[in-house]
Amino acid sequence: MKTDLQELAVRLFDAGAVKLGDIEAKLGRHTPIYFDLRVVVSHPRIMMAISKQLENISSGINHDILCGVPYAALPFAAVMSVNTNTPMIMKRKETKLYATKKILEGVFQKHQNCLVVEDVVTSGGSLLEAVAQLRNEGLIVSHAVIVLDREQGGVAVLKSHGVEVKSIFTMTNLVEILRDAGKITDETVEIVSDHIKECQFGMKDNLV
């Protein structure tokens, strides 16, 4: 019998959220596997399943509000907010240039504990930028929950900045689940494993 995580991994693959091949990622970097959670907005049951798993791993974390990192994580944060009756704020991609000129939308108080919700962590740069902006607004950010840790150094970088990260999947266990389900081959698992080892990020890298 499949576990909930095994079933979720297969559903994500079937929905096209897991893409294989020589794929160009940020800054021209190439990867043999790409995780695109933006497609999940068209699959409500998968969106609910991911949000429930994120709720599970955040249940022991003290937090007053949620903040989803745009754009892929926003739907998950919204569902978590409704399911748990936890207030949510939204971080804009850029500061509003008119009227309120806010970087954060929603109601919050300084010194509240804010749990950040993100889709994928590779180098940790995008999440670290969001954390910095939230802290600049007076919020306390010590934890983040994510769907996938690509195991390329980003989680360690975030920890060094005082942010503990919990993930639903690591890249290793995701590809192993998909292999065991007959969705990908042993060769693909090996290629992904080699890529993880060869492409590690740290504090000296230009984080994105």
Image (cartoon, rainbow, N blue to C red):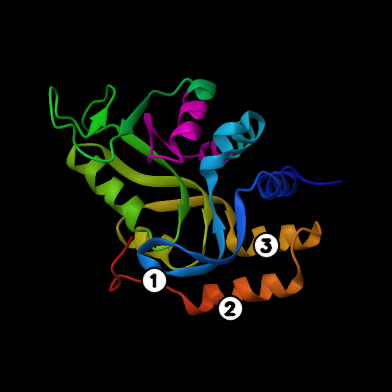
Disc 3 is placed on an element classified as helix
Q: Which residue is mark 1?
A: 201
Identify which amino acid the numbered label 3 is placed on.
Answer: Val
Identify which amino acid the numbered label 1 is placed on.
Answer: Phe
All told, the count of numbered labels is 3
Let me know if residue 7 is in the magenta part: no
Q: Which residue is mark 3?
A: 175
First in sequence: mark 3 vs mark 2: 3
Disc 2 is placed on an element classified as helix
Q: Residues within 10 Å of mark 3 (few under 14, many from 20)?
A: many
Foreground residue, 60 or 152?
152
Q: Which residues are magenta?
A: 54-81
Q: Which residue is mark 2?
A: 194
- Residue under the point 42% across and 46% down: 144
Residue 43 % position (x, y): 63, 33
Q: Is there CB contact under 8 Å for labels 2 and 1?
A: no
Q: Is there CB contact under 8 Å for labels 3 and 2?
A: no
Q: Is residue 4 left or right of residue 147?
A: right
